[in-house]
Image (cartoon, grey):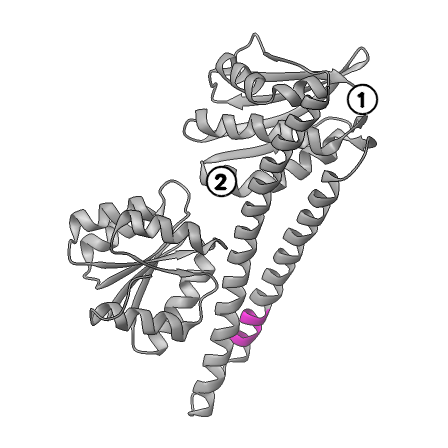
Amino acid sequence: MRVLLVDDEEELVATLAERLDMRDIDAAWATDYRTALAMIKEREFDIALLDVRMPEMNGLELKRLIEAQRPDMKFIFLTGHGSEEDFKACSAESGKEYYLIKPVQIEVLIAKLNEICQGQGERG
Amino acid sequence: MSSYHGKVDSLGLSFFGSMTASISHELKNALAIINENAGLLGDLVVLSEKGRPLDPERMKTISENIRRRVQSADDIVRRLNRFAHSANQPVVSAGIRDIFACMVALSERLATMKGVSLALAPFDEIEVQTLPFVIENLLWICLKNIFLLAGAEQRVVLGACREAGDIVVTLHCTPEIPVEQLASTVAAEGQPLIFFLRMQIQADPDGSSLRLRMPIKFIE
């Protein structure tokens, strides 16, 4: 499984990528939308894990740009928002996305990645 | 007057909600990073049990990252506490620079999201007799409207000076934004607060600053 992590907190994505690598998940990371889009052009990914709130471009906007280049990619949104209700509404509006709320336990993340890659499970 | 108090309270509640939501987001980020670093420490220990040697320098770095993020989370909570107390303070003697510093710290994350940088101009502290929360609320209305008008690499510098018996607060914007429009928007949205503080609001003739003039002593 090839995962792209995008979050403006470098320490978060770099550490998470290292932990996923330890579990044989091929993880790359970016801290801004430009780098993420450049990486998408150069490499194949199965899933992108996108922070919702980032400077310059939010995760929902970035998802649309990635999707234009890679229609088969799947997405998980990562949010720091305490309000699950808000994000469910946001998720419902944009259709088929999945989301996780920070901080997320790695076992939960991996289960979600597997679920999505295997096309199983419920949304949200 | 009582209806004004109601409007001031209503604006204050909305402001309090915006700030605490933003602060909770900052805390979530700090917790997420602490969580990943703690998880990484655990992962490295598990790997060492399987024969991979532990690198003491790496362990030190990760521990230091956790310590730094705990400190950052503590700073965020301290700001939240100071802000929460300002909401129930009566008229007090407060330094305008302290009020600015609090607002810059509270708004920094939201400013960064909009590509705006905030700074304080060098000026000597000025003591005012006021309700700090109401001033913070009005500054927030100014800042959030600047965020809406902001161009690329927008910078906002907050300053203050004495003029006669008043204090004049300036929000200097570079590059220039339509400050006349900003002044009108802030005057409309913050009207109950402006009335409450006996404030005058105007766009500076130089076209780059918003000026808020109010008495140094709050008039009941």
For the C terminus of chain B, the quadrant is top right
Q: Would you say residue A34 is visible in this rendering?
A: no
| Residue assigned mark 1 | B218
Q: What residue type is labelled 1?
A: Phe
Q: What stretch is highlighted in magenta?
A: B57-63
Viewer-nearest of discs 1 and 2: 1
Q: Would you say residue A29 is visible in this rendering?
A: yes
Residue at figure coordinates x 45%, y 36% from the top left: B115
Q: Quadrant of residue B87?
A: top right
Q: How far apart are marks 1 and 2 (CA)?
A: 33 Å
Per the image, label 2 sits on a secondary structure element best described as helix
Residue A117 is labelled as none
Q: Which of B114 and A100 is in front in this view?
A: A100
Per the image, label 1 sits on a secondary structure element best described as loop
Quick check: is B58 in the magenta stretch?
yes
Q: The numbered mark 1 sits on a residue in which chain?
A: B
Left or right, A30 with reference to B33: left
| Residue assigned mark 2 | B112
Please determine whether, in this image, residue B167 is positioned above or below residue B136. above
Please determine whether, in this image, residue B176 is positioned above or below residue A4. above
